Amino acid sequence: MKWFWIILTFLFIGLQYRLWVGEGSLAEYWGLKSKIAVQQQQNQQLRERNEQLKAEVVDLKQGMEAIEERTRSELGMIKEGETFFQLVEKPTHPAAQTSD
């Protein structure tokens, strides 16, 4: 009977070791669970970005307004017949410098 309890104790310790430290342990499970949460958040952000890009592609394929807006903002282009005004601010005078 004594050997039975010794074997049972070692078996219990072995199972506890695997549960807490070994392969497939609770610590590994919790670590993977947190990695999955981070990856799901990144995937959601990428899905939203893809939806915005799809909408932009559709807009660029269908309408000239989007193309015109892009050329105006990114390339600084103007329409034929438009008048372009550029306002230049006067440079501010530096503060009076003191001499030694």
Image (tube, rainbow, N blue to C red):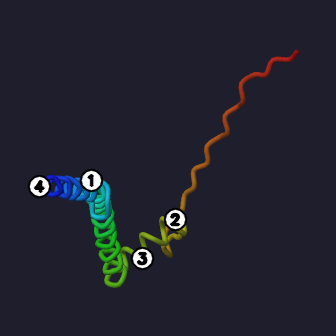
**Label 2 crowd bin: few (<14), some (14–19), many (20+), radius 10 Å:** few
Residue 22 in percent (x, y) is at 31, 60
Say if 54 sits above or below 44 in the image: below
**In this rendering, the label closer to the viewer, 2 or 3:** 3
Camera-side residue: 22 or 54? 22
Residue with the mark numbered 2: 83
C-alpha separation, residue under disc 2 versus residue under disc 4: 103 Å
Residue with the mark numbered 4: 1
Type of residue at label 4? Met
- Looking at the rendered structure, the secondary structure element under dot 2 is loop
Type of residue at label 1? Trp
Q: Are marks 2 and 3 in contact (CB under 8 Å)?
A: no
**Label 3 crowd bin: few (<14), some (14–19), many (20+), radius 10 Å:** few
C-alpha separation, residue under disc 4 versus residue under disc 1: 29 Å
Residue with the mark numbered 3: 67
Residue 98 in percent (x, y) is at 81, 17
Q: Earlier in the sequence, mark 2 or mark 3?
A: 3
Q: Earlier in the sequence, mark 2 or mark 4?
A: 4
Q: Residue furthest right?
A: 100
C-alpha separation, residue under disc 1 versus residue under disc 3: 59 Å
Q: Earlier in the sequence, mark 1 or mark 3?
A: 1
- Looking at the rendered structure, the secondary structure element under dot 1 is helix
C-alpha separation, residue under disc 2 versus residue under disc 3: 20 Å
- Residue plotted at (48% across, 68% down): 72
Residue with the mark numbered 1: 20
Type of residue at label 2? Thr
Q: Are marks 2 and 4 in contact (CB under 8 Å)?
A: no
Type of residue at label 3? Ile
Residue 47 in the figure: left or right of residue 1: right
C-alpha separation, residue under disc 1 versus residue under disc 2: 75 Å
